[in-house]
Amino acid sequence: MSHNQHEHPAQCCCCARAATQAATEEREPFRLADLADVPRTQWIGGGIMFLVVAILILARHA
């Protein structure tokens, strides 16, 4: 029996799991203020990685 044909969705484990996930999973929208919570070392590491990749791409096309 397909999921659309259930008379009582709570009887099916898949439908019950989907219903509980939908009820508990309310994500907050992304805000730029959330970036303040990122540690400074992670910003520095990400910046270095970005520069390395950018330099390698530019060097390959030169």
Image: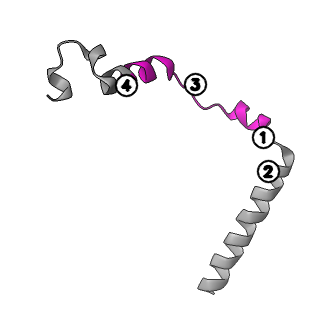
Q: Secondary structure at mark 3?
A: loop
Give the foreground label among 4 and 2: 4
User: Which amino acid does the dot numbered 1 rest on?
Assistant: Val
Neighbours of disc 2 within 10 Å: few (<14), some (14-19), many (20+): few
Q: Residue at x 78, y 35 (%)?
A: 37
Ranked by sequence position, the earlier of labels 4 and 3 is 4
User: Disc 3 to disc 1, how far (Cα)?
Assistant: 17 Å
Q: Position of residue 59 (x, y in %)?
A: 67, 83
First to last magenta residue range = 17-37
Amino acid type indicated by mark 2: Trp
Question: Which quadrant would residue 38 be assigned to in this image?
Answer: top right
Identify the residue under disc 4: 18
Mark 3 vs mark 2: which is more N-terminal?
3
Q: Secondary structure at mark 2?
A: helix
Q: Residue at x 14, y 28 (%)?
A: 1
Count of numbered tags? 4
Using the image, determine if residue 60 lies above or below residue 46: below
Question: Main structural element of the magenta stretch: helix, strand or loop?
Answer: helix
Q: What's the image's color scheme?
A: one colour
Residue at the bottom extreme?
62
The image quarter in which residue 28 lies: top right
